[in-house]
């Protein structure tokens, strides 16, 4: 399958790994929008949030289980951080493999633009 994030998980495309377990892979975004910006992906191809099902939601659970530890690794636990999922064209999704952005190291406004 021609999926960039599947290739990153497989090690076919290099990435700067921050965290990994049996279901989750997290790596530094190539174009960070914050001092700390990590992309967190399930180690199975789920195209977008629209494709989350009762069968594969365990990967989303695993991602959220990993998030506090990833935040700790990045040193942003205390000051806080933002987690974002972009879904589809209007959501701004550019890579069609479900992922969550964890961003920290600066203050974010709300509502998001
Ligand atoms: P999206 O826009 O789909 O929510 O997020 C995709 C993210 O993947 C973007 O923030 C983009 O900078 C990042 N990205 C795209 N290609 C690569 C790559 O080859 N390596 C890494 N580390 N990040 C990438
Ligand atoms: Zn994929």
Image (tube, rainbow, N blue to C red):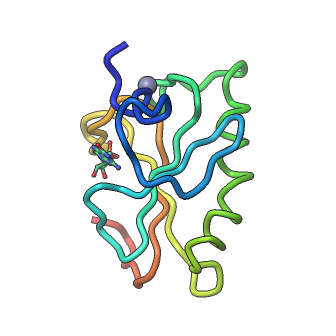
How far across and how far down the image is residue 27, in percent? 47, 52
**Residue drawn at the location 31% of the way across and 35% of the way down:** 95
State which quarter of the image contains the C terminus: bottom left
Give residue 24's position: percent from left, percent from top.
Answer: 63, 41
Is 73 left or right of 33, judged from the image as shown?
A: right
In this view of the protein, which residue sits in the foreground, 30 or 89? 30
Quadrant of the picture in which ligand 2 is shown: top left
Displayed quadrant of residue 34: bottom left
In the rendered view, would you say 107 is above or below 32? below
> Which residue is more in the foreground, 106 or 7?
7
Please state the horizontal and vertical placement of residue 72, each as a whole percent of the image.
66, 73
**Is 11 in front, or is 45?**
11
Residue in the image at 35% along x and 29% along y: 96
Residue toward you, 56 or 16: 16
When the figure is inspected, residue 1 is found, relative to residue 7, above or below; the finding is: above
Query: What residue occupies the far top of the structure in this picture?
Result: 1
Dividing the picture into quadrants, the one containing residue 56 is: top right
Q: Residue at x 55, y 73 (%)?
A: 74
**Residue found 26% across the figure and 38% down from its top:** 94
- Where is the N terminus found, in terms of image quarters? top left
Count of residue discs: 0
Q: Along the horizontal axis of the image, is 8 left or right of 42?
A: left
Where residue 62 appears, as percent x and y from the top left, is 72, 42
């Amino acid at each position: 399958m021609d999926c960039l994030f599947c290739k990153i998980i497989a090690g076919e495309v290099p990435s700067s790994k921050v965290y990994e377990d049996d279901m989750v892979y997290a790596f530094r975004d190539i174009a960070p929008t914050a001092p700390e910006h990590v992309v967190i992906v399930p180690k199975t191809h789920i195209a977008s949030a629209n494709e989350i099902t009762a069968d594969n939601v365990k990967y989303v659970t695993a991602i959220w289980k990993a998030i506090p530890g990833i935040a700790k690794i990045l040193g942003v636990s205390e000051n806080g951080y933002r987690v974002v999922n972009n879904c589809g064209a209007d959501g701004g999704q550019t890579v069609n493999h479900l992922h969550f952005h964890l961003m920290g190291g600066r203050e974010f406004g709300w509502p998001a633009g």
